[in-house]
Amino acid sequence: MNLTIENILLVGSLLLFISIIAGKTSYKFGVPTLVLFLGIGMLAGEDGIGGISFNDPQLAQLIGIISLNFILFSGGLDTDWKAVKPIVKEGFALSTLGVLLTAVGLGTFVYFVTDFTIYESLLLGSIVSSTDAAAVFSILRSKNLALRSNLRPTLEMESGSNDPMAYVLTIAFLGLVINQDKGLASMIPLFFQQMIIGTIAGFGFGKLSKIIINKINLDFEGLYPVLVIALMFITFSVTDFVGGNGFLAIYICAVFLGNQYLIHKKTILKMYDGLAWLMQIVLFLTLGLLVFPSQIVPVIGIGLIISLFLIFVARPVAVFISLIPFKMKLRRRFYISWVGLRGAVPIVFATYPLLAGIGKANMIFNIVFFISLTSILIQGTTLSVVAKWLKVSIPSEEKKLTPSEKFLEEHPKTEMREIGIARGNRVVGKKIVDIEFPRTAIIAMIKRNEKYITPNGSTEINADDVLIVLSETKKGIGKVYKALKIKEFSAS
């Protein structure tokens, strides 16, 4: 069946519905939802029972890039900087040196076990060199896995920030495959250009986005998430246009915004959480449709050999070398090595050789797909078991909520105070969002000129206002007084 304008919505919505229902029950059988999304896409494809004809790598790549924007941005919004800050050096080492060592180690192995040239081998190694943000975020969170110390922030930071390095290596080695007269030295300027511009753009657009979100006065709350989507795509596209790494820029931008006070932040976070899931489903379904299972069968043997080498040799060696300068228990290093999930990102990167038209593009794509599938099946299904075996997990009831989870969770408010704002107070004339109000408290109402108004983040505090504040604890009320620049701890 060919996809047409008339049936694309029907087919798409049915596939989406089936994926959601299948995902709901998948973990009863220990199967990651991402595998089911891929499987449903393959069954619906030309080789499957659906018979849908989809052979457009360019469209698949576009869908992949758009989806990765949402997935990385959502992951960045949910990243707690206070938790990440102590392990930022480890995360940076894993997302740069770790990716490079994985690409080189696996590429060298591929060169000796296949008839690929050295550059084709390194291209394959580069494509699968990064852990997949979509796979790591979704599997860790859906399994509700509680890990000791800073393991989870380390894993999520690595997966969220290592795609740029893999992208640079993929583009560089693809260029060397096409133009073999160039040397490895030509990669170095590209790497620094992508990383430096991407980092600067990420911070710059993050600060600019915060100003725009908090200063612009939109009439409808529902427009604020739409505004953030626009800012996300502007960040990615402008960074890419000037030669930087757009994936790195949007991740840094999102991490910055996720740790700031924003107007209607709860609405933005909830929407992005839903959109991230939607994009994961769409991405894996699309990639499943793009694959022809009949073409996967001939590469199962070599694909399995390469995949096992990646899981048990290349990834662990890269992790251990990258973490040599840092103090970390051996079992934690082993667990980081095991959570080297490959998913949609390598498959998206594998479309670049297809579009470039190099000789072994189809074989590379099929091997990469098989590697991603086996990685999710082998590693994704055993994360909890290996965590218990290595004693790096803790009981789920002892798991600490992330700031985003605390922020979105509805807690009963047990303390109430009426706090008067005197003339001359430094918060007069400021918007509530600019006061950095404690997250455990809310301004339920403001009494102004004998009338009560319901405030939001853009509401300005006036002199002689009486704020009716609700908090979870008395300690929270104390933080409110501190935020309002009021020293006296007394009810007005």
Image (cartoon, grey):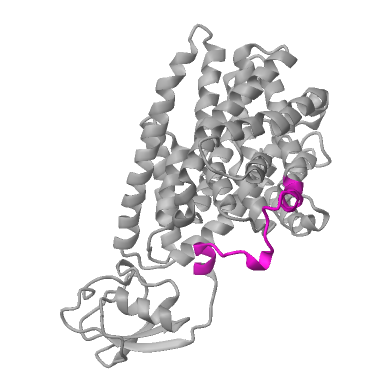
Tell me the residue at 78%/50% (across/down).
31
Position of residue 290 in the picture relative to residue 161 (left or right): right
Residue 105 rendering spot, x and y as whole percentages: 63, 23
413 over 98 or under it: above or below: below
Instruction: Look at 62% across and 16% down and name the residue there.
Output: 120
Question: How many numbered discs?
Answer: 0
Quadrant, the N terminus: top right
Asked whether residue 185 is in view, the answer is yes
The one nearer the camera, 45 or 473, is: 473
- Magenta-colored segment: predominant secondary structure: helix
| Quarter of the image where the C terminus is located | bottom left
Q: Going 41% across and 78% down the picture, which residue do you hit? A: 476
Is residue 23 or residue 289 the one in the foreground?
Answer: 23
Give yes or no for residue 391 being in the magenta stretch.
yes
Q: Position of residue 199 (x, y in %)?
A: 39, 39
Residue 111 appears left or right of 164:
right
Above or below — where is 286 with respect to 127? below
Q: Nearer the viewer, residue 5 or 36?
A: 36
Q: Taking the image as drawn, is residue 1 in sight?
A: no
Q: Residue furthest left?
A: 424
In-image side of 424 versus 226 (left or right): left
Say which of 327 and 426 sits in front: 327
Residue 140 pos. (x, y %): 65, 53
The residue sitting at the top extreme is 181
Res 288 quadrant in image: top right
- The magenta-colored residue range is 380-407
Location of residue 42 (image quadrant): top right
Give the quarter of the image for residue 301: top right
x and y percentages locating residue 401 in the rendered image:
56, 65
Q: Is residue 290 magenta?
A: no
